Image (cartoon, rainbow, N blue to C red):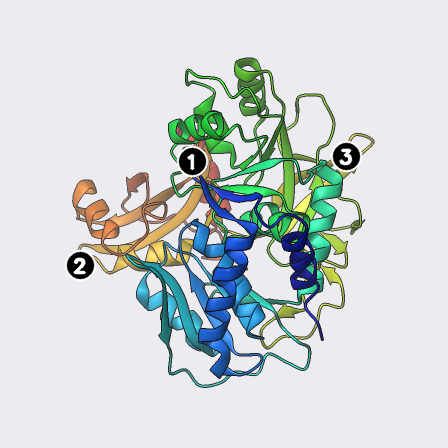
Amino acid sequence: MKNPILERWAGIVAEKPEARAVLTPEGAVARTFAEIEAEANGIAAQLGGLGGGAVVSLQARNCPEWLAMLLGIWKAGGCALLVDAAISESARASVEAKCGARARLGVGGEGVTLEMLENDPVSLGTERVDLIKLTSGTTGEPGAVLFTAAQLEADCDHICATMGIHPEDLNYGVVAFSHSYGFSNLVTPLLCHGVAVVASADPLPRAVLDGVAATRATVLPAVPAIFQAMSALEGEMPALRLCISAGAPLRPQTGAAFHARFGLKVHTFYGASECGGICYDASDGIITQDGFVGRPLQGVTLELHEDGRISVRSPAVGIGELGQPSRNGVFQPADLLETSDSGWRIVGRDSDFINVAGRKVNPADVERALLEHPGIREAVVFGVQDPRREETVCAWVVGSAGRDELLAHCATRLARWQVPREVRFVEAIPVSARGKISRRELRALHEADNPA
């Protein structure tokens, strides 16, 4: 089966080989379309001996080489496993083994690096798989979601058509290419529509504002925390016309502050790794409701169930998770929604995962790290609302360790966004009448004692 994205890419390269494809945050052209193509062909030649269908992990921060590495994997007939650049070596090795990765591509001091791996082969099912996304899902073990190129292509077309993104635009790429949001809004628009992208690995709001101004980017996909922080900065972005917020719910205050500062609406975008884009607020009005996400994207239909869950039907829904039955074009997110004449709104979720500036944190991972400290006997972790980061990680602990000592201990075991920002030492963790610990109830108790 042919890869439809490669076919569209070939047409774009033939049409405008010397056009800019990837820019630096300073505005210099880092790659033309022809240069990406040549680099991809070289990588494909290196991978040629692995055979069709081989899984190759791709781990790198946003950079010009990222696009060529993905294309090189596909040109060699392989399946790309997208790995977050920030995860630990042990976590990377675990997901590579889970997916049967045969090789690993990355970027070192001299450019693209290739390392062969000795993992046992893993069956991906009977359907051709072109891409694997990793998602936290609802358990502590990362889920491996399988996609065909046709499903990825459909998601890209839904996004570009609904949001009005055109080949003349310039995307500012601060969201990680390896994340589902960045892949759908930055990577595939380049490969399928020829939308040039700025490859930036610096998420600091000042750097984003300066980069958008220097490159004259027209489209900025980002997370709410970035838009909130940018609202307090000096500077202008004269060419920017479209701002997209995803990864976490956009608070009305954030949208209003950004509009007041720059005169631009921040459009909310709701999606999931398993199915791509779901809803988008294309209206001109500033949102006034928490959790508002607009209407379904073109090509996407939603069905609301009595329990508040939705079924997403779309040609962009992935095959399913590794080892699980096919979704057959239907996916149910963990969020709870309601609908009205103005659109859809997220009113809650049936998951305990914490959303920290667009990154999902598994409370169990943080609790495990806390309990590894010899002075901690019990620990419960949950998320609390934070106007800058959407949610922040909070821990209630029983033990004798000092706060600073405990946080330093966590910093050696967790990514920076997983480390608790709030720690409360208690004599005992409250339990329900049935003797169970409820993160939702603890969150309510914590917020009642600490009103915004």
Q: CA distance from mark 3 to mark 1?
A: 36 Å
Residue 319, given in percent of the width and then of the height, sits at 68, 68
Q: Residue 235: which quarter of the image?
A: top left
Q: What is the three-letter code of the residue carrying label 3?
A: Gly
Q: Residue 76: which quarter of the image?
A: bottom right
- What residue is shown with label 1? 25
**Callout 2: helix, strand or loop?**
loop
| Sooner in the amino-acid sequence: mark 2 or mark 1 | 1
**Callout 1: helix, strand or loop?**
loop
Looking at the figure, which quarter contains the N terminus? bottom right
Foreground tag (2 vs 1): 1
Q: CA distance from mark 2 to mark 3?
A: 50 Å
The residue depicted at 75 percent of the width and 44 percent of the height is: 297
Q: What is the three-letter code of the residue carrying label 2?
A: Pro
Determine whether, in the image, residue 275 is placed left or right of residue 62. Answer: right
On screen, residue 179 above or below 217: below
Q: CA distance from mark 2 to mark 1?
A: 45 Å
Q: Residue 344: which quarter of the image?
A: top right
Query: Crowdedness of circle 2 by 10 Å Cα count: few (<14), some, many (20+)?
Result: few
On screen, residue 426 above or below 169: below
**Callout 3: helix, strand or loop?**
strand
Foreground tag (3 vs 1): 1
- What residue is shown with label 3? 343
On screen, residue 155 above or below 389: below
Query: Crowdedness of circle 3 by 10 Å Cα count: few (<14), some, many (20+)?
Result: some
- Asked whether residue 135 is in view, the answer is no
Callout 2 touching callout 1 (CB < 8 Å): no
- Asked whether residue 219 is in view, the answer is yes
> Which one is nearer the viewer's eye here, 171 or 431?
171
- What residue is shown with label 2? 374
